[in-house]
Image: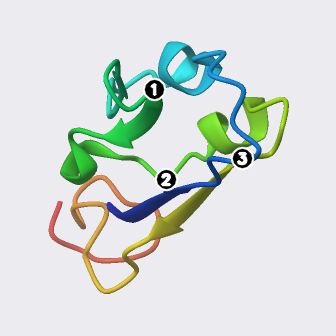
């Protein structure tokens, strides 16, 4: 889950790569402000593909580690609720 998507407006070149590579469609493009924003932060998988794909390193993904990410029945991190 995404806590914050930080965008450095001085580095962003408006290429929209971050929105194109987001496979969960969390990132949308604000046409008026000409900047990406997190439209669906709860759907973010914190894969950071958007951050890695940005050619200008203008994005920073800030995860919300206080939230539970994977149900115990599909997680490999433990739990015996199968």
Q: Look at discs 3 and 2 and give the one toward the viewer.
A: 3
Viewer-proximal residue, 28 or 70?
A: 28
In this view, 50 is above or below 2: above
Q: Earlier in the sequence, mark 1 or mark 3?
A: 1
Q: What residue did someone put label 1 on?
A: 34
Q: How many marks?
A: 3
Q: Secondary structure at mark 2?
A: loop
In this view, 32 is above or below 65: above
Q: Position of residue 4 (x, y in %)?
A: 40, 65
Viewer-proximal residue, 16 or 67?
A: 16
Q: Position of residue 77 (x, y in %)?
A: 46, 72
Q: Look at discs 1 and 2 and give the one toward the viewer.
A: 1
Q: What residue did someone put label 2 on?
A: 46
The quarter holding residue 53 reads top right
Q: Is residue 32 left or right of residue 13?
A: left
C-alpha separation, residue under disc 1 versus residue under disc 2: 23 Å
């Amino acid at each position: 889950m995404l806590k914050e998507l930080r965008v450095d407006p001085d580095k962003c070149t408006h290429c929209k790569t971050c929105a194109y590579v987001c496979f969960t469609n969390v990132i949308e493009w604000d046409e008026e402000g000409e900047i990406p924003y997190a439209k669906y932060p709860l759907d973010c998988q914190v894969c950071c593909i958007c951050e890695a794909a940005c050619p200008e390193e203008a994005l920073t993904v800030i995860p919300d580690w206080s939230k539970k990410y994977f149900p115990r029945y599909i997680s490999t991190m433990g739990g015996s609720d199968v």
